[in-house]
Amino acid sequence: MRFTHDPQHGRVVFGAAAARESLTAEVDRLGGQRVLLVTTPRGEALARELTAPLGARLVATFTGAREHVPVEAARAARALAGRERADLVLSIGGGSTTGTAKAVALTTALPVLAVPTTYAGSEVTPVWGMTDGQRKTTGTDPAVLPAAVVYDPDLLAGLPEHLAVASGMNAMAHSVEALWAPGGDPVTDALAQRSIAALADGLRALSAPGGAAPADAQRSRAAAREDLLLGAWLAGTVLATAGSGLHHKICHVLGGAYGLPHAPMHAAVLPHVLAWNAPAAPRAAAAIARALDADGAGDATTALAALAREVGAPAALQDLGLEEADLEEATDLVLDVLPPGNPRPTGRDDVAALLRAAWAGPPASAGPRLGAGGREGQGAT
Ligand code: NAD
């Protein structure tokens, strides 16, 4: 056993009502006197309510955060930060909003205080991403890692269930890949397993059919959001420290080239990458199976496919806008970025079979065609 554990994230405040109760104190801690709020048109009302106690310290609001952080949005947010002489960027929203705040931090070195409203996990990673036309560029810079995060499960009560399920599966992908990623160690392994179990619990509870008394149902949904957000935090943490691999590379390519929606795409691809890698990553697969296997349902691939079915996760790339005619080109694009340390040697036919299986949808547990085993061991977001 030989490793260097280099934890990446900043301060975390977690709990129901934390945003309402702790936001001003966290702004104070970071010395924020001129706060730039970054959000979306949809998130603006909530963000305004949460930041009302800041009064005149909120000097500007940027509502132009958009999926995949277009460079135009990044430039506009940076210009606003400069004009208003902001000293703190406060993001309230999903991964796209956090990503826009990170884009401001990248060129201004302003500290970021992140208040996530999805389970994307970007708020605890030093990874930034931006798109220029069809081209998505990502990079890692400690300057973009939020200085503090306020996790408040209450804020996710309004996230529609289909988005919550997809977002939870996006977090699941971070933790699954961390178990075979190049920078994994015993600490990230333990966090990833805890994350997978919490995400599975939260997803099952969120999607469980009603029947309980309304108050019980409400309590169980609140508990589900808590599990999911805990799982999402740990997932972002292990993504930042352990890195990622084949799954995130495939999603990076598909998101950039075909504009597929981020979280649903992760949900549709993950069971197929797991089915492919599991035979060559037995320790990772056993850990995933243990974390997922609520009913003793067997191996990691079967358990993940069963969970995805049970919670109604997006299951087919053809439903998300990928055309069958795109598969050939997508295969070539993935081949260009294949991570060298994937547990299983992966060639063109393997990528083609995996993408076709993810495009077509279930049965994911059968997985793409299986070949010879390989070794455990690389990774993008
Ligand atoms: P998103 O931020 O685009 O949000 C998805 C949708 O949910 C949007 O329509 C948004 O308006 C809506 N929404 C968000 N919170 C809501 C709430 N509480 N209630 C109702 N609606 C809500 O998507 P995402 O999946 O959170 O993030 C995806 C982006 O994050 C991608 O650009 C991805 O590359 C990036 N990301 C980056 C990292 C990293 O480490 N850098 C990690 C994960 C994701």
Image: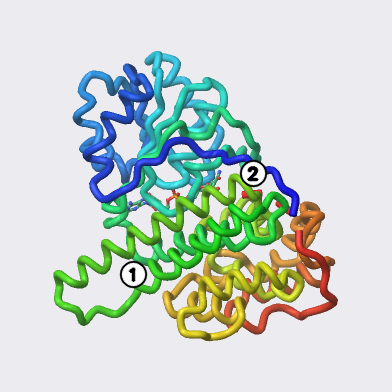
Residue 23, located in which quarter of the rendered image?
top left
Q: Is residue 84 left or right of residue 256?
A: left
Residue at 29 percent of width and 80 percent of height: 209
Picture coordinates of residue 184, whole percent (x, y):
67, 53
Q: Nearer the viewer, mark 1 or mark 2?
A: 2
Q: Quadrant of the N terminus?
A: bottom right
- Residue type marked 1: Leu
Image mark for residue 5: 2
Q: Dot 2: few (<14), some (14–19), or many (≥20) neighbours within 10 Å? A: some
Residue at 22 percent of width and 40 percent of height: 20
In three-dimensional space, the C-alpha distance between marks 1 and 2, rounded to whole angstroms, equals 34 Å
For numbered disc 1, what is the local secondary structure? helix
Q: Dot 1: few (<14), some (14–19), or many (≥20) neighbours within 10 Å? A: many
**Residue that mark 1 sits on:** 206
The earlier-in-sequence mark between 1 and 2 is: 2
Picture coordinates of residue 44, whole percent (x, y):
29, 39
